[in-house]
Amino acid sequence: MTAQQLSKLNIKGIKIAPPYGRLLGEPEKNAVIFIWGEKGAGKSTMSLGLADALAAHGRIEYIPAEEHFGKTLVDRVKRLGATHRNLNFTKWKSIQSLKEILLKNRSFGCILDSISVIDANAKETVELAQWCRENGIMFVMVSHATKDGQYKGNTSIAHECDIEIKVTKEGGAETEKNRYRELTAIAVPFTAADRKVSPKPKSSKQASPDNRENPVDTPFKITLKKLDNLHKIRSWKRINSMFGSKMPCYAPRHSGESENAHLSIRYTADYPKKRYIMDLLLDGHLEYQACTEGTGGGLKACWKKLVNKYGDLEIRIFKQDHAKVVLGAKEYKRQERALAKKEPKPTPPSSPPSKTKKQPTKSKPTTAEKQVKTAPKEKDTSSDAETRQPIDIEAAKESQAKLDDFLTKILG
């Protein structure tokens, strides 16, 4: 195929329901996805939710090779609401039988949880992934993490995949590699309610900042001092994730959800010499360097020096989801409660127009009539009523004001 012929090809990716689509982008239908993480981190929850989302495009074969058709699988299906009619569960027998099932059912994709059943170090794993790719079948493989915090298996597995997803014990899923979009991260949906994140936005009005139910209106700014007060700093990668970048240095300004960040840090630790260096980078250029040594050094000491020097430096957040990550759950809920208390107060300005509606001449005689009724019956003549009319109007105004105050309280 010539370069001109190649340039005329229009290969479209598939759209996946949120929040999985936000993590994966729009991959090709024959993409290879690799999910890994520590024990109990939520790999199976992530892979099952993804399988149900992918089922919108065709038949999905989910192979629970480790837990089989046990109680844990049934509970997970109910918890996630993973009941799409195209999602099927297949028992593991062998690679050859799996290939036959995929071809027979004309399956759109296959999810193998986990590849430890076919020996993660063996060539069969990579060969199965290549076979799925050649036959236009999406292949998702799940693997465990080792004690060293790396995925279990040969490095050829990560090289073969198009998307590599790491599931953390904190309940997050982050892409270590993605050929279809910039690296990003999401919170792993653990219930059916978590998966229904954004079915509401149907119009542009709902997406506008004025109609947000969230306490934080983006874009908003936060200083390093405020960030330090909100979080316990344990990792330089965690700091960069709050800045908007997962890697040490990026040139473009960040959008909140992407990896590109205007502000980022780089941390280097020389443990044998007990010397630690933290670099502050602005738009990819070194701005400041904090260095600590000895037993009193390390990440926290470097970060403290950086905050003391550049504590007033501001980070600008453009995405609502990223704003929630930056603030943290505790501060976000605090602002939500504060917003809930403020919500009833803005309503009184709408009450003044009601005064103009309640001031017709018809309402005044009613109060005047009440005043007349309270007066002695002997003096209730037409001439006396005319002489007392100014007094009745003043009383009507007073009673009308009281009535308006009462209505504004009730309506408010």
Image (tube, helix red, strand yellow):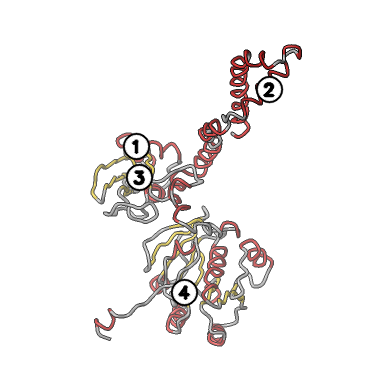
**Spatial CA span between label 4 and label 3:** 44 Å
In front: label 4 or label 1? 1
Please give the residue where the numbered disc 2 appears in the rendered image.
Answer: 369
Q: CA distance from mark 2 to mark 1?
A: 73 Å
- Identify the amino acid type marked 3: Arg
Front of the two marks 2 and 3 = 2
Q: Tag 2: Cα neighbours inside 10 Å, few (<14), some, or many (≥20)?
A: few
- Drawn side of residue 380 relative to residue 100, left or right: right
The quadrant of the picture occupied by the C terminus is top right
**Of 229 and 233, which appears nearest the observer?**
229
Q: Label 1 neighbourhood size at 10 Å, few (<14), some (14-19), many (20+)? A: some
Residue 196 appearing in the image = yes
Quadrant of the drawing holding the N terminus: bottom left
Q: Residue at x 55, y 71 (%)?
A: 113
Write down the residue under mark 4: 121
Q: Amino acid at mark 2?
A: Glu
Q: Earlier in the sequence, mark 4 or mark 2?
A: 4
Q: CA distance from mark 4 to mark 2?
A: 96 Å
Q: Which residue is mark 1?
A: 307
Please report whichever mark, 1 or 3, sits nearer to the chain's N-terminal start: 1
Q: Nearer the viewer, mark 4 or mark 2?
A: 2
Q: Is residue 270 visible?
A: no
- Could you tell me residue 381's position as x and y percent? 71, 15
Which residue bears the numbered disc 3?
A: 316
Total marks placed: 4
Q: Secondary structure at mark 3?
A: strand
Mark 2 and mark 3: span between their CA atoms? 64 Å
Of tags 4 and 3, the one toward the viewer is 3
Residue toward you, 140 or 50: 50
